[in-house]
Amino acid sequence: MNLKYAIFFSGLLLIGGCTQYHSPARSTWPTYLRGASFTDMTEMARIAKRPVFLGAGGKLISQIDAPAKMDYGDKIQNDTVISVNYMANLEYELYDALRKPGISVQRAGTDVVVILVRDAIMELDVGDISPDGADTLKTISKILKKYDATFMEIAGYTDAMATAQANALSLDMAQRVGVYMAQDGINTARMFIVGRGAARPIAGQDDIGRLTNRRVEIRLVPAR
């Protein structure tokens, strides 16, 4: 009898683990994304957002434990050393955890950029997060909770063929990713969410290039 119950409950857990994620109703997105900014993550925008970020429990790079070897003379220099070390560790953890087709992790100075090709995280014919996409975003969220002294810009992009609805489609992708992360416990006061349409292509306009250009980029910068 005990064995039968064990098999029964194991089956329930397996079914629960396979339940597909669906984005909540669009009308609820503003509630989930309360605290996020819908603008480019410029330096001025980050400075303006800092009081909101700190008020929502965020922390700055200067509050992170410093590496053992560093010069304690100049604060700006020290913050830079901490930032470089902190973001290098973040890049490594993301790169190590996201070895999947259609996903890449890049470094630009102290910034870390995660590129998520649309078809790697969303259903092919439906505007929603796919099971693999939900798994990927959950992995990213887990790491970003650990490295929480960062601001994040979630930017959606389309290919050049989707000119009529490009901005709406790209913003939709970015918002869906933002909503998922908010549901998974990421502080929305860290978020900047934008849809850039067909701007900033990273590949050509052939069939493969267009698939690559349809993407969401998560850019992470140290919070100062």
Image: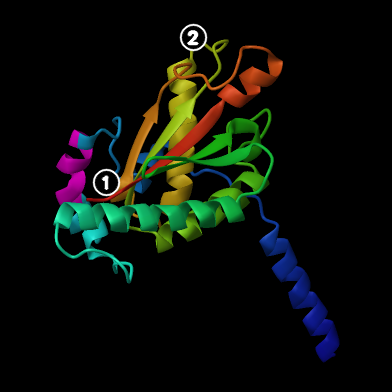
Locate residue 90, reporting x and y percent: 45, 55
Task: Tell me the residue at 29%/30% (across/down).
Answer: 39
Residue 58 visible, this angle: no
Q: Residue furthest bottom?
A: 2
Return the disc, 2 or 1, that comes first in the chain's sequence. 1
Residue receiving disc 1: 35
The total number of labels drawn is 2
Task: Tell me the residue at 17%/52% (across/down).
Answer: 76
Task: Tell me the residue at 48%/35% (across/down).
Answer: 217
Locate residue 11, reporting x and y percent: 78, 70
Locate residue 159, reporting x and y percent: 56, 17
**Which picture quadrant has residue 97?**
bottom right
Mark 2 residue element: loop
Kind of residue sitting beneath label 2: Ala
Disc on res. 172: none
Q: Distance from label 2 to label 1 (Cα)?
A: 29 Å
Residue receiving disc 2: 164
In front of the other: 39 or 6? 39
Residue 198 visible, this angle: yes
Disc 1: CA contacts within 10 A as few (<14), some (14-19) or many (>=20):
some
The colouring scheme, among rainbow, by chain, secondary structure or one colour, is rainbow
Q: Which residues are magenta?
A: 44-52
Disc 2: CA contacts within 10 A as few (<14), some (14-19) or many (>=20):
few
Task: Tell me the residue at 33%/44% (across/down).
Answer: 191
Mark 2–mark 1 CB contact (< 8 Å): no
Pick the quarter of the image with the N terminus: bottom right
**Left or right: 63 as drawn, with respect to 135:** left
Mark 1 residue element: loop
Position of residue 141 relative to residue 178, above or below, is: below
